[in-house]
Amino acid sequence: MEKQGSDRIWEIDFLRGFSIIMMVWDHLMYDLKSVPGWFANYSELSHPVIQTVVDFAESYWYGSARAVGHFIFVAIFLLVSGISFTFSRSNGKRALKFLVFALLISAVTMSVQAITGLTIGVFFGIIHMFALGTLITLLFRKLWDNNLFILTIGVGIVVAGVLLDWRNVPYAELTFANSWKIILGIKGYGADHFGLIPYTGVIMIGTVVGNLLYKPRLSLLPKLDGAWNKPFLLAGRHTLLIVVTHQPILTGLVFLIGYLVGYHI
């Protein structure tokens, strides 16, 4: 194993960047498949190119490739986040920073949804889950910084998610009584929903992997590093910026193109 010149482990940045890029792709497909429901006069206008794009997005969104790949990419992102947890001494500050951005996203999307009626509200999405899940992981690590203990808790949370069939939880109205169930992952709500169960367990498992495989903070695959991975490394090193900005940009572009071709809400 060899240490990276910038004290960064290239495969960690690569996997994080790859999962973030796939997350952006997934959200783009969501926006495109939602076009018929976002524009009131969609069925009145005939745009073959846009219809082809929407059909492709719908086939992806409801297809088996997305059903499997979506959870794989999310698992990679959270597992790598758990590994990175072991490198940082400021996980609490990082989690609180993400939580602030998450609350801003909720405030904006829920307000737009209330004003326009568009189903874009996010109450507890992936950023909320990541922030709170990181704080929970930090709490358990403070309670007992033992890998076997953390692994047991993490696996238990993942198993709980499997038993609850987290992929098919019923979606519910956003009420005070339902809010804690939505946060836990027992029920779903919004355009982007990720409950603490089972995803927090993946973060915890990632911290164990980080302690076991990356304690010296050295790459396990130094000879595979090279120019070929630069786009993924760039994305992986600017996670927060991409996570926070990509959805408003994608949604804004979809609406801009829609208005330019004659659609309206």
Image: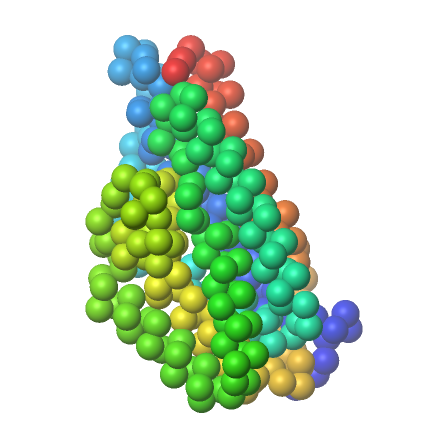
| Colour style of the rendered protein structure | rainbow
Q: Does residue 37 appear in the picture of this structure? A: yes
Towards the viewer: 227 or 103:
103
- Residue 24, given in percent of the width and then of the height, sits at 49, 46
Instruction: Residue at the far right: name it.
Output: 5
Of residue 126 and residue 15, the one placed in the foreground of this image is 126
Most extreme residue toward the front is: 176
Q: From this viewpoint, is residue 60 visible?
A: no
> What count of labels does the image hold?
0
Horizontally, is 55 left or right of 208 in the view?
Answer: left
Quarter of the image with the C terminus in it: top left
260 is higher (above) or lower (below) than 202? above
The residue that appears at 62% across and 65% down in the rendered structure is: 92
Residue at (40, 76) in percent of width and height: 154
User: In percent of the image, x 60 and y 57: which residue is there?
Assistant: 96
Instruction: Check the picture and name the quadrant holding the N terminus.
Output: bottom right
Residue 251 position, x and y percent, is 48, 31
Q: Residue at x 23, y 54 (%)?
A: 168
Across and down, in percent, residue 67 comes to: 29, 54
Seen in the picture, residue 239 relative to 247 is either above or below; the reply is: below
With 253 as the anchor, is 262 left or right in this view?
Answer: left
Could you say which quadrant of the image residue 191 lies in? top left
Q: Position of residue 263 (x, y in %)?
A: 40, 14
User: Observer-nearest residue: 175 or 239?
Assistant: 175
Q: Nearer the viewer, residue 261 or 110?
A: 110
